[in-house]
Amino acid sequence: MLNLLGMQILGAVSPTTKMVDDLFWFVFIVSAFFFAIVTGGIIILVALYRRRGKPGLTSGASHNTALEIVWSILPVILVVIIFFWGFQVFMRLSISPGDSMEIRVTARKWNWLFKYPDGSRSGQLVVPVEQPVRLVMSSEDVIHSLFIPDFRVKMDVLPNRYTTLWFQADKAGEYDLLCTEFCGDGHSRMYTKVIALPKDEFEKWQTENQGTASGPDLFVMYGCATCHSLDGKPGIGPTMKGLHGKTETLADGTTVEVDDNYLRESILEPQAKIVRGYQPVMPAQPDITSDELDALIDFIKSQQE
Ligand code: CUA
């Protein structure tokens, strides 16, 4: 098994990996073969027929019918094979198996939220092995793109529309999941993991994942951690350290005391009061439940100096 730039190169970890890799290697080997023939031929002919002494008369050969037919028909056959093979792989990648487990994906600046059929949520894509998984994805703001390199699957995630993608993890393990459409300051931080678990461990995880997540988990799951530090360093947004009880100066020069109601408003309607020196870039959180909101506010309150 070869690993290049963190990507599995040989050793399929998903049926989609295998179908994409087989086609890729076919195209690559055919291309490498003809590259060698053409460049090798040029080098040999240049050496063989280089100018030596007085030039003699060149031969009157103008064409070679057999050779021309071969170099026309052969590439046509290869290109047609690549077309039909590629079309077949495209169709198989586009149509998820009927027994797929459906997980909804919400992308926003700048994190991923995965919603399971039982209503639970997660910031990491936890899936059972040997089970086709269909992602139904949409964005709350700009265009993002979900990419799982090890499974060779990638699909744009658009606002106001659903796009889908499927894969099946054949081996338990952790796989990278990232955004590949530049979506602003935090684009490179739209990075999480696919965690493939054996069936029984997945069921255990699902039971544990029900109900309201803990404050620290929510802080990551809703993407707060992307922009708000806990250690006092300013990020894309103000730090959470010592925030509760502090008096903030807003963009319009007025001041506000940070209490529970201010935090609540800032989570549900982030544009209502912008702290001076920061951009109004935080997305609203329409998915958050009231229990989660309470847990998140408690967590922020606990971040004292
Ligand atoms: Cu989301 Cu880049």
Image (cartoon, grey):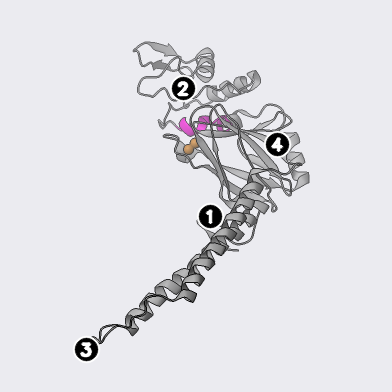
Q: Earlier in the sequence, mark 4 or mark 2?
A: 4
Q: Are marks 3 and 1 in contact (CB under 8 Å)?
A: no
Query: Which x, y percent locates residue 192?
Result: 56, 41
Mark 3, mark 1: which one is toward the viewer?
3
The segment highlighted magenta reads 219-231
Q: Is residue 237 left or right of residue 261?
A: left
Q: Which of 24 and 41 lies nearest the eye of the viewer?
A: 41
Q: Where is mark 1, residue-wise? A: 6
Per the image, the residue denoted by label 4 is 102
| Quadrant position of residue 24 | bottom right
Q: Earlier in the sequence, mark 2 or mark 3?
A: 3
What residue type is disc 4 on? Answer: Glu
Secondary structure state at the residue bearing disc 3: loop
**What's the CA distance linking mark 1 and mark 2?**
38 Å
In the image, residue 169 lies at what x, y percent? 68, 49
Q: State whether residue 229 appears in this view.
A: no
